[in-house]
Image: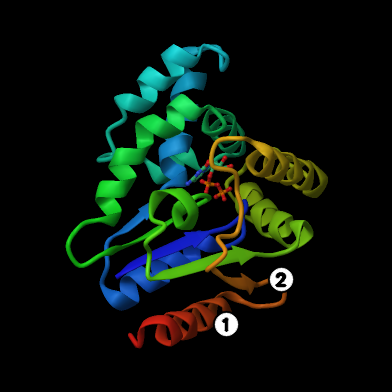
């Protein structure tokens, strides 16, 4: 069973994806980490984001094993990820890796922006997780300020709105709800309720409990 979870920044899609993967004992790939790793490397090497061949080469040589999720979850790296993710050559370089992860025997859970639309349109279950920008910004603010980042609620909200806009308006695999995806708006739901809703969706679609 392939489960595709998409949604905008800080929507809680990772939480839902990890919970479903644990519940159904499926491998899980947080595809945002791939774009974050490329973005972090562009920053670390001082490359120009407009140097498409160089940025695409970084994406093509990316090793998934050993990605440091914690180190990649900073505000500046999220912004850099969104910039490299708008480059078609970067997306192309990362497609095969994601498709082969999705296609492994037994299936997998993947979360990102284009899993249900581009990476695994054949997924048995597609869920689009979202919440209002304000609710998402409040969660991301709590996360980043707990890590000691110098942010304000307003700066985080501004960043989220900017990133949503870039992710939704790009021509290459824009963030969009697949026609056959089920929506979870978790603005007023806590973590447990969001996960329960996702489990119901899987059960309804596939009979798996
Ligand atoms: O955790 P958060 O939702 O803030 O970000 P993420 O899922 O780690 O993704 C970081 C950035 O990577 C996003 O803003 C997207 O631009 C990009 N991304 C993408 O384009 N396609 C994916 N499948 C996953 C992430």
Residue at 48%, 20% in the rendered image: 42
Judge whether residue 67 can be spotted in this image: no
Q: Position of residue 115 (x, y in %)?
A: 45, 53
**Percent of width and height locating residue 80:** 57, 30
Residue 179 found in image quarter = bottom right
Measure the alpha-carbon separation of dots 1 and 2.
11 Å
Q: Counting other residues with Cα less than 10 Å from the Cα at mark 1, is it few (<14), some (14-19), or many (20 or more)?
A: few
Residue 97 in the image: above or below residue 199: above
Along the viewing direction, whichever of 68 and 79 lies nearer the viewer:
79
Evaluate whether residue 155 shows in this view.
yes
* Relative height, residue 162 to residue 99 (above, below): above
Residue that numbered label 2 is attached to: 187
Q: Quarter of the image for the C terminus: give it.
A: bottom left
Q: For the residue labelled by badge 1, is the local secondary structure a helix, a strand or a loop?
A: helix
Work out whether 173 lies above or below 19.
Answer: above
Residue beneath the point at 38% across and 64% down: 123
Q: Looking at this view, is 22 or 152 the one in front?
A: 22
Quadrant in which the N terminus appears: bottom left
Q: Residue furthest left?
A: 105
Q: Nearer the viewer, residue 1 or 135?
A: 1
Kindly identify the residue that appears in the image at 53 percent across and 50 percent down: 113
Badge 2 crowding class, 10 Å Cα cut-off, few under 14, some 14 to 19, many 20 or more, is some
Q: Which mark is residue 193?
A: 1
Please tell me which of labels 1 and 2 falls first in the chain: 2
**Tag 2's secondary structure?**
loop
Residue 172 at x, y percent in the picture: 55, 36
Residue located farthest toward the right when viewing the structure as drawn: 154
């Amino acid at each position: 069973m392939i489960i595709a979870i998409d949604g905008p920044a800080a929507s809680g899609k990772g939480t839902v994806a990890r919970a479903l993967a644990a519940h159904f004992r499926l491998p899980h790939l947080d595809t945002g980490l791939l774009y974050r790793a490329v973005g972090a490397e562009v920053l670390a090497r001082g490359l120009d984001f407009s140097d498409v061949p160089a940025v695409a080469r970084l994406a093509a040589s990316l090793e998934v094993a050993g990605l440091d999720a914690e180190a990649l979850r900073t505000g500046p790296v999220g912004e850099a990820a969104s910039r490299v993710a708008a480059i078609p050559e970067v997306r192309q370089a990362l497609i095969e890796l994601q498709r082969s992860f999705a296609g492994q025997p037994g299936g997998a859970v993947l979360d990102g922006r284009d899993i249900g639309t581009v990476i695994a349109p054949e997924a048995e279950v597609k869920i689009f997780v979202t919440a209002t920008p304000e609710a998402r910004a409040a969660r991301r603010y709590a996360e980043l300020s707990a890590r000691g980042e110098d942010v304000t609620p307003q700066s985080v909200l501004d960043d989220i709105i900017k990133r949503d806009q870039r992710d939704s308006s790009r021509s290459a695999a824009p963030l969009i709800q697949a026609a056959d995806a089920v929506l979870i708006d978790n603005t007023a739901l806590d973590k447990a309720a969001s996960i329960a809703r996702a489990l119901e969706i899987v059960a309804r679609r596939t009979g798996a409990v």
